Image (tube, rainbow, N blue to C red):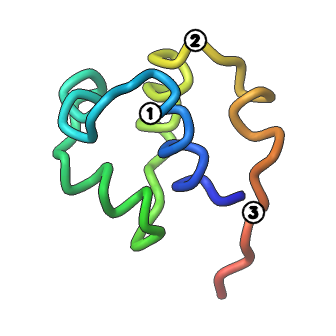
Amino acid sequence: MTIGEKIKELRIEKELSQTALSKSIGVSQKAIDYWERGVNEPKASYIMALVQFFELSYNEFFEDIQISDKK
């Protein structure tokens, strides 16, 4: 699973639109869309905001995420 897939999964579990999530963490809806589609990945500060918003630990957030080595 990618970070984007995890964000989408968590968002859908909470029955949130991309717009609702974006407003909750202070980013644009387009940023959420790009993250979910893998166009880019959120900065660390937004990952922190997502972890807090979804009330997860970092371990829970990253437990099934495969980190890619983009070089």
First in sequence: mark 2 vs mark 1: 1
Picture residue at 19% right of the left edge, 47% below the top: 29
- Single out the residue that lies furthest toward the bottom: 71
User: In the image, which is nearer the foreground, mark 2 or mark 3?
Assistant: 2
Q: Which quarter of the figure is the N terminus placed in?
A: bottom right
Task: List the residue tagged with mark 1.
Answer: 11
- The secondary element bearing badge 3 is classed as loop
| Marked residue nearer the N-terminal end (3 or 1) | 1
Residue at mark 2: 55
Q: Are marks 3 and 1 in contact (CB under 8 Å)?
A: no
Q: Amino acid at mark 2?
A: Glu
Q: Residue at x 18, y 27 (%)?
A: 23
Left or right relative to 26: residue 4: right
Disc number placed over residue 28 in the picture, else none? none
Disc 2 and disc 1: Cα gap in Å? 12 Å
Give the structural element (helix, strand or loop) at label 2.
Answer: loop
Q: Which residue is mark 3?
A: 67
